[in-house]
Amino acid sequence: MSEHNEYDDNAIVNASSNLHMNDLLAMRLSRRQALKGGVGVTATVLLGGLGLTACGGSDSAAGLALGFAAVAKNKNDVVTVPDGYQVSILHALGDPMHYGDSSWQNNGTETADSYNRRIGDGHDGMYYFGLTEDGKYDANRSDRGLLCVNHEYVVQPYGLHPAGITAGASRVASEVEKEIYAHGVSVVEVKRSSGNDMSMVRGSKYNRRITSATEMAFSGPAKGNDGLKTKFSADGTKTRGTNNNCANGYTPWGTYLTCEENWLNVVGRAAGDDALRTAKEVVSLKRYGLTENRKSPYLWDTAGSDDLFARWSSSVVGASAADDYRNTANNFGWVVEIDPFNNTSMPVKRTALGRFNHEGAWPAPAVVGQPIVIYQGDDARNEYIYKFVSKALWSASDVNGGLAAGAKYLDEGTLYVAKFSADGTGTWLELTHGKNGLDASNALYAFENQGDVVINARLAADSLGATKMDRPEWGAVNPLNGEAYMTLTNNSNRVDPTATPTGSQLKPDAANPRYYTDTYTNADNTTKTNKGNPHGHIIRWKENAGSVAATQFAWDIYLFAAENNAAADVNLSGLTAVNDFSSPDGLYFDPRGMLWIQTDDGAYTDVTNCMMLAAVPGKVGDGGKATAAGGTATIKGANATPDSVRRFLVGPKDCEITGVAVTPDGKTMFCNVQHPGENGSLATPSSAWPDSQTSAGSSKRPRSATFIVTRKDGGAIGV
Ligand code: FEO
Ligand code: CA
Ligand code: CA
Ligand code: CA
């Protein structure tokens, strides 16, 4: 979601008083001891002191080396790639996926209905599935595939419409209808055309839109729960729509996972609604940010009494949950499984994985005979990192098992939340009804059953004392050694560790250690200062005993994002001009084990547009102790070098780079630009991308799009 020069935006609704890491730090390690440790303690000493072993994972860097000239930071209105590389546009907002609809007209005249067959807005998470001639998933297929792309939201300044979003207290129905269909997911067939470049196969039987109105089923522990019941589904087994689909995941059986993040954008609640609710409902609604008298930014519920619009109001208006949409909010925040190979299959919301601002769902590599493990993040300040471990053990015979395989692995299992300890260890705390106080006697919330736990995963995690993080965005698991990475994009809510926090403010802790001030130069040359952790960092962890299903892990901070000229205790990873960046967001290990880091930034955009870096990471424990700006002790990975992290591309103006996929042969890369020109308007657009990529001086409307990067010499990307 856009951040409009405010370096972080998502609402803070976690007011729980968990023990913070700085408290743990005070208990276990005096400040003086921490400082004495300094930087540069070897991995052996550090891990030895923790009773862990530094070996056990293969060296992820083996055989992989970055081999391109770093792209310089810039503010041009194009995607800038290294010398020897080229860019083409695969698809952009409004492009028709089938025959029978006109091409995109650049004037907002496309009909609402046609967006059921056009590419949606706000390109975000993405995955490439190799496709065989007989319509099956083949993880090794590079020349033909199905590309699933999330369409997170409608970019407000342009809004799809002839003259932008029509202002007023009530929305225009035809505009809202178009927006509902422009959200969700697109599935398109892609094929190599010339060389390694690819194009969308217009009219392919696989091409499909899933929108904020598509019927879908609930499965897992919350299926049929009272909290999911609506006028549309009185038994709480179905809903319509997935929306605000941010990041994503995939399964080894060949299905796509799309995740529902900022659904508060489209759900409102009337004044006085608390009085019509049970005390428990009010606690739950508040914890998820849906206070009474809350108008949603998109006001979809104001477009008329038609059920298509009315269902976005979560106000109590009927006699029971079966008579209104009081539970609409509980219908969102989930992981949705889509079978891209079966274009008539009904998507399924897998409730066992929990409900929150669901950023994404990233699987560890599947191992025959071991459970399926999926890491997840809740993107808001002070929220948590989660892990799901399936009950069923992986059998390779389930590849191409579709949603039946999904039911086997994703409907039963154990949900955990992460607690990061100051000594570099961590614990996965189990969110199971009847354990750890998660029952009807719980003081925060009376959990009646596991459905109640997953619907209210945040409250369950509060109750167990999970660690509040600096906005968990994307995760990724290194295919070469199983170590998990997650971006913590930034947090304006970290406060000076010597001050007394008020309200929801947090002091830094070992896993979110920095407190510093960043300077930002506005367009008119005035400056502002951003305080807290404006640039973010990337944490990583290694499960104990080599098992991804373990409940104990070791962690360090892989990279601290920073401007290259920042103070040493801010630029803790030693970034230089070839690899400095701010606000890591998208994250992806390609099949070769190369890591791609994408930015969604409002703290370094005075200097450069958002970007993507390539990295060949080491492993947990390859650095040592450090003291972050503000004085908090932490544990960092080895310093970055131009050989380990390097800027691969810079995006067009006012965009976020988000979503990336690489074919198994490493030769075709898909990447997304979201909301180019978001700080402009229809009258004065600040970008004309993607048209500006090939037409300098273009005045066409900016559009979110998927672009393709290939090497002119036909070689593999990045090496
Ligand atoms: Fe859609 Fe968490 O960014
Ligand atoms: Ca994002
Ligand atoms: Ca700055
Ligand atoms: Ca973001």
Image: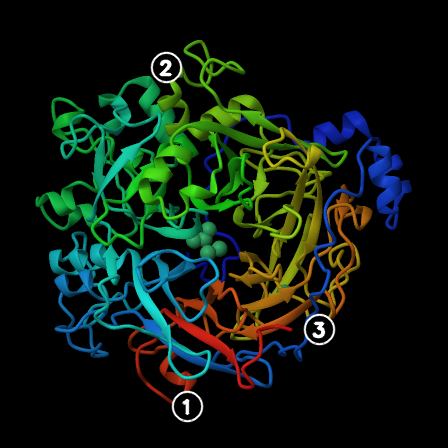
Q: Left or right of 320: which side holds 59?
A: right
Quadrant where ligand 3 appears: bottom right
Structural distance between the alpha carbons of marks 2 and 3: 54 Å
Lower position in the chain sequence, tag 3 or tag 1:
3
Q: Amino acid at mark 1?
A: Ala
Mark 2 crowdedness (10 Å alpha carbons): few <14, some 14-19, many ≥20: some
Q: Name the element at disc 1.
A: loop
Residue carrying label 3: 577
- Give the image quarter of residue 406: top left
- Residue situated in front as seen by the camera: 81 or 610: 81
Q: How far across and down, in percent of the image, does residue 343 sit?
A: 23, 54
Q: Left or right of 199: which side holds 554?
A: right
Q: Which mark is residue 448?
A: 2
- Give the image quarter of residue 674: bottom left
Q: Amino acid at mark 3?
A: Ala
Going by the picture, which residue comes out furthest to the bottom? 696
